[in-house]
Image (tube, rainbow, N blue to C red):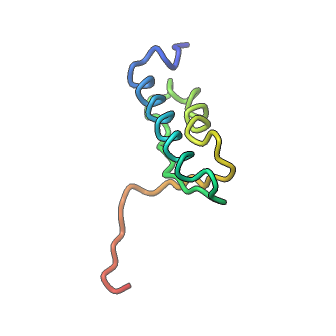
């Protein structure tokens, strides 16, 4: 079993989650609900075991968070 932090890309991803969390908490600490784009699960099965930890770091210090995961396509309607 490989450690999550043995992979440099996982270290960068966790660092990004920490920094993003700091900004979101600073700007939205009094919000009743925070909407965040839910990062996709790792393509590599070895990263699965720490995916939830990554999400927890992303949401730490926020009371209510709604994670939204899109289909990867934007839909634009001219007649709306």
Horizontal and vertical percent position of residue 54: 55, 33
Instruction: Give me the residue at 46% from left, 57% from top.
Output: 70
Instruction: Give me the residue at 43% from left, 57% from top.
Output: 71
Residue farthest along the left direction in this orientation:
78
Q: Quadrant of the C terminus?
A: bottom left
In this rendering, would 62 be left or right of 37? right
Horizontal and vertical percent position of residue 49: 58, 26
**Foreground residue, 30 or 21?**
30
Count of numbered circles in the view: 0
Horizontal and vertical percent position of residue 67: 57, 52
Residue farthest along the bottom direction in this orientation:
79
**Foreground residue, 25 or 68?**
25
Q: Quadrant of the N terminus?
A: top right
**Foreground residue, 19 or 51?**
19
- Look at the picture and state if 80 lies above or below 56: below
In this rendering, would 20 be left or right of 65? left
In this rendering, would 75 be left or right of 24? left
Horizontal and vertical percent position of residue 25: 57, 45
Instruction: Give me the residue at 35% from left, 64% from top.
Output: 74
- Look at the picture and state if 13 lies above or below 76: above
In this rendering, would 5 be left or right of 34? left
- Look at the picture and state if 43 lies above or below 3: below
Instruction: Give me the residue at 34% from left, 86% from top.
Output: 79
């Amino acid at each position: 079993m490989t450690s999550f932090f043995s992979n440099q890309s996982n270290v960068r991803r966790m660092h990004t989650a920490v920094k993003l969390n700091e900004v979101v908490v600073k700007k939205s600490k009094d919000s009743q609900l925070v909407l965040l784009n839910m990062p996709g699960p790792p393509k590599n099965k070895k990263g699965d075991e720490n995916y939830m930890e990554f999400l927890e770091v992303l949401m730490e210090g926020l009371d209510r968070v709604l994670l939204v995961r899109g289909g990867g396509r934007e839909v634009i309607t001219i007649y709306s």
